[in-house]
Image (tube, helix red, strand yellow):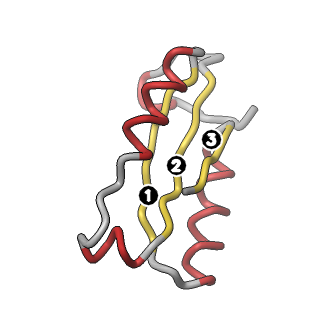
Amino acid sequence: MADNGDAGGMEAGTVTAAVLVVGNEILSGRTRDTNTQWLATELGKIGIRLREARVVPDVEAEIVAALDALRAKYDYVFTT
């Protein structure tokens, strides 16, 4: 598990996750992100707290940087 430090007031031992949403279409408003809400709901059912959602454009360097930052902070990182 990642070392979450204070984890925003979360209890020690809480399993955490983040979602990285990739796509210019999301940022432009052409497409609505419905994956994050669904993922948060489903993860909650199995005791995993979705703590962060981040949206990045279709730029490889930005995707890699965001993924590296999130994986250092949370137990799981999902991408869509």
The image quarter in which residue 8 lies: top left
Instruction: State the residue position of label 2.
Output: 19
Q: Contact, CB < 8 Å: mark 3 with mark 1?
A: no
Of label 1 and label 2, which has the lower sequence position?
Answer: 2
Marks 3 and 1 sit apart, C-alpha to C-alpha, by 13 Å
**Residue type highlighted by circle 2:** Val
Q: CA distance from mark 1 to mark 2?
A: 6 Å
In-front residue for pair 58/61:
58
Farthest-out residue, left: 29
Q: Which residue is mark 3?
A: 74
Foreground mark, 3 or 1?
Answer: 1
77 sits to left or right of 28? right
Tell me, yes or no, whether the two marked residues, 2 and 3, touch with CB atoms within 8 Å: no
Placement of 20 over or under 29, stated as above or below: above
- Specify the label residue 1 is tagged with: none
- Quadrant containing the C terminus is bottom right
Mark whose residue sits in front, 2 or 3: 2
SS assignment at label 1: strand
Dot 1 amino acid type: Arg
Which residue is painted at 61% across and 48% down in the image? 78
Answer yes or no: do the residues labelled 1 and 2 have beta carbons within 8 Å? yes
Q: Residue furthest front?
A: 31
| Mark 3, secondary structure of its residue | loop
Q: CA distance from mark 2 to mark 3?
A: 10 Å
- For residue 54, which numbered disc appears in the image? 1
